[in-house]
Amino acid sequence: MASLLARGLAGMPEVRAGDDLAALIVRARGPDQLCDTHVVAIAHKAVSKAEGAVVALSTVTPSSRAQELAREHDKDPRVVQVVLEQSTHVLRAERGVLICRTRHGFVCANAGVDTSNAPSSDTVVLLPPDPDGSARRIRARLRELTGHAPAVLISDSFGRPWRHGQLDAAGLQLRATWLAVVDAAAACTELVRAKDSREPVVVIEGLERYLGDADGPGAAALLRAPAEDLFG
Amino acid sequence: MASLLARGLAGMPEVRAGDDLAALIVRARGPDQLCDTHVVAIAHKAVSKAEGAVVALSTVTPSSRAQELAREHDKDPRVVQVVLEQSTHVLRAERGVLICRTRHGFVCANAGVDTSNAPSSDTVVLLPPDPDGSARRIRARLRELTGHAPAVLISDSFGRPWRHGQLDAAGLQLRATWLAVVDAAAACTELVRAKDSREPVVVIEGLERYLGDADGPGAAALLRAPAEDLFG
């Protein structure tokens, strides 16, 4: 009988710049309680904070474009400035939401710049600059600390405006399956993790049939060329 | 510590037209093993089959439009005819996939008409004509049989081309949260249920904070007017 168990990891401290996230996870979980068949899902904000991907708004000088967008959409011009710096394109600006293509290539609201859950009210949290690299580093460090290499999933709850998967052409089937699994695992994590809780890490058991020793293609596989996208 | 456990329900028989799904579920699960805090997630195909929402292709006469689309997209003209009958609009037809708006108002590939998992290779399975009504009937019947009313979720794995939720305006926040939970629960179910397994039912524990005695808004809440949709 197939089953899936996802549990929030209790006992994680507030993450600070420079923290060794893998070590914090191992300490909270217990060194013998992680194995290759687990998925360790980490809220991207914990990764961003550990990597120092936060910006103090007091250090930000809004450009004239940021000031104009902020006026039009009733937003803090310094936050808009940070959003613009994280973006290669602003695709739409409607009803207070800037839909941006980030420097990674993700399309999301406000370029993933988050004003909630920041270390202080004067700070915003960015997306990690290289989430795939972060996941691989954390996985390698977990392997170093425990001898086991659970899958590492860094997730955000941003409402991606389109889903990938079943509409991909046949040649992309494997990739599509992989994406659907990652997408679903991230969604399942969101159910476990109350938004403001101190549980940035959720450990999922029961997905071993999808896991392998090699690192996966990463979030880079989420990015597809606009021409590939039926709804682009 | 927050946690979520999703388990496939072993022992479900192949569902046939006229079957009492709730009774089959109670028999497989055990009458004392369901409670108000559980979510019973049922693959829509089991509901469709029980309700007789299947079509024998030998009874279908393709229209000239169906024949033309079938030629262009290398599909069975009888299947295309069924897809057209289930649709109010064909929004796009590309690379062998017809993106349709169904009579319910859902936008999905091939109007949800499924040629896999059908009772025989000459049969296709439709979406249930009124999934919300089906869910409410099954829930009422479970209450009748066991004295308990778990939430009932009828899900499909169709790749909806857009996600709802965070981009909704503030006034729709509650609805957005509800949709995100339902969406995530359905995704989590997909992880548990191997595509072709005989486990059309997955029971989820750990979502009690989202459940209430009253029936929810149903899938009708998934439908939003095109004007509301930033990516419409």
Image (cartoon, coloured by chain):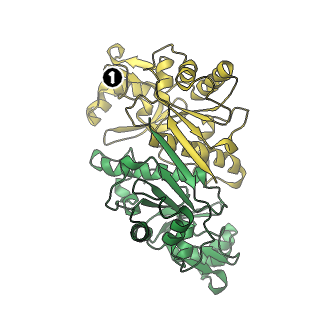
Chain colours: A green, B yellow
* A73 with respect to B29 (left or right): right
Residue beneath the point at 57% across and 74% down: A49
> Where is residue A169 shown, x and y percent of the image?
31, 46
**How many numbered marks are there?**
1
Image quarter of residue B96: top left
Image quarter of residue A66: bottom right
Image quarter of residue A219: bottom left
> Where is residue B154 shown, x and y percent of the image?
55, 32
Residue beneath the point at 53% across and 40% down: B6
> Where is residue B149 shown, x and y percent of the image?
68, 28
Label 1 Cα neighbours within 10 Å, binned few <14 / some 14-19 / many ≥20? many
In the rendered view, would you say A66 is above or below A173? below
> Where is residue A161 shown, x and y percent of the image?
51, 54
* A223 with respect to A14 (left or right): left
* B16 with respect to B69 (left or right): right
In the rendered view, would you say B108 is above or below B10? below
Q: Nearer the viewer, residue A169 or A69?
A: A169
Amino acid at the residue labelled 1: Arg
- Quarter that holds the N terminus of chain B: bottom right
Is residue B223 visible in this depiction of the protein?
no
Mark 1, chain letter?
B
* A159 with respect to B195 (left or right): right
Q: Nearer the viewer, residue A40 or A43?
A: A40
Residue beneath the point at 62% across and 29% down: B34
The residue at which mark 1 appears reads as: B78
Q: Nearer the viewer, residue B150 or B129?
A: B150
